[in-house]
Amino acid sequence: MNTVAQGPKFVVSRAEGAWLWDDSGDRYLDGTASLWYCNVGHGRTEIADAVHRQLSTLDAYTVYGDFANAPALELSERLASHAPVADPRVILTCGGGESIDTAAKLARQYWAVQGQSERVHLISRTGGYHGLHGFGTSIIGMERFRSGYGRLIEDTSVVPHNSLEALEEEILRVGPDRVAAFFAEPVIGAGGVHAPAPGYFEGVAELCRRYGILFVVDSVICGFARMGNWFGIERFGVCPDMIVFAKGVSSGYLPLGGVIVSGAIAEPFWDRPGNPFVHGTTYAGHPSCCVAAMANLDILEREDLFTVSLEIETQLDAAVRTLADHPLVAEVRSGVGVMAAVELTAEALGERGITTAEIFAEARARGVILRAIPNALLISPPLIVTWEQIDHLVSTLRSALDAVAQRH
């Protein structure tokens, strides 16, 4: 807030494809697809047209109880048909944070109606980002998002992100009969772009089966072609109990998210009377948001952005790794999904007093938008980005690194 209060605002006035323009008419490459979500790129008129048609027919109406609308039903069927979840059911929400809270509450409630109300503990991973709602803040794997709020939701813990041994040790420490669910992103996104070690998710699935723990995949960032498939987790050949989605489902054109739940987890609520899941949000199943998502999915399939993204993944990986020799760079992480991280050295961040915010500012002044976290710059462009735009992004980042290095 202090940054906003101290200086002029960066006002985005319009966008098209992978480009943004500010209110002065200057153009910028959107190197982050806004917040990881604009997978099909900006300015897709067919999405806007679909929303206009829907608003002219049915603006909105609740989907509580047995109320429904055609777009919500059609979208749910479509998502379920692609989900690597057994006998899937869909709960719609308005975004990723709501979806994480929904999955966490459902996991705890599932065990309660099964007569195991002591199973409330939730385990997540270092670096994992799960939104900033109540449960999301409580299970997030980055302390800076948790501090200063006092006591959050209890019975949660965080384990090192690529250690099966640490996960099993934590399950045994807490007690398997007290653990409700384990939450993980296919690739850790906002926490620094950390891909899983070979065999990691196969091991997670086995541990969850062994100890009867629900496996919840957070695909909010990784879904809808960013990893070359529908939900990201397919690359690792496992079948979770729940998948949380948002962002790329509508490419951010309108807010939408949800949870895909296996039939086994849905069964006590779906098939047995007297077990209501007393949870919901006002705008869940909003028909205009659902038609925006349907039009967005049409683009993903028609332009085969699933295949395209795998090509971009290779191109981005090759380009961004050329920064590994820069004296300010400690590590480049890329190659699994259309996302990358350029991490600065401890010397740069410590003795030299360089901040990623400085590099972000230098890149933006040169016409490229990146995302800065405390130790790295993150890249996640729209999936319609071209090779020339990737080259421009990486060369601009190198220029920004050079400019900051010269000042320090």
Image (cartoon, rainbow, N blue to C red):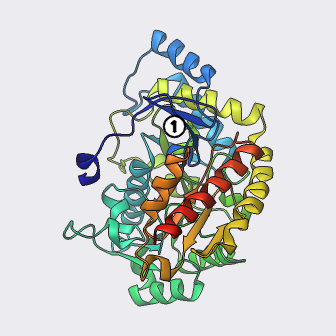
Residue under circle 1? 252
Q: How many marks?
A: 1
In the picture, measured across the screen, residue 110 lies left or right of residue 307, that is left
Counting from the top left corner in percent of width and height, residue 255 is at 45, 36
Counting from the top left corner in percent of width and height, residue 83 is at 66, 49
The residue that appears at 75% across and 44% down in the rendered structure is 388
Residue at far top of view: 56
Can you say whether 19 is above or below 33 in the image? above
Can you say whether 72 is above or below 404 in the image? above
Residue 374 vs residue 210, the one in the foreground: 374
The residue that appears at 53% across and 75% down in the rendered structure is 212
The residue that appears at 40% across and 75% down in the rendered structure is 353
Question: Residue 198 appears in which quarter of the rendering?
Answer: bottom right
Whether residue 229 is visible here, answered yes or no, is: no
Check disc 1 and report its element: helix, strand or loop: loop
Counting from the top left corner in percent of width and height, residue 38 is at 57, 40
Residue at far front of view: 406
Whether residue 46 is visible here, answered yes or no, is: yes
Can you say whether 50 is above or below 238 in the image? above
Counting from the top left corner in percent of width and height, residue 367 is at 56, 43
Residue 391 vs residue 340, the one in the foreground: 391
Question: Residue 164 appears in which quarter of the rendering?
Answer: bottom right
In the image, what residue type sits under mark 1?
Gly
Can you say whether 198 is above or below 362 in the image? below
Residue at far left of view: 150
Residue 15 vs residue 383, the one in the foreground: 15
Q: Residues within 10 Å of mark 1 (few under 14, many from 20)?
A: many
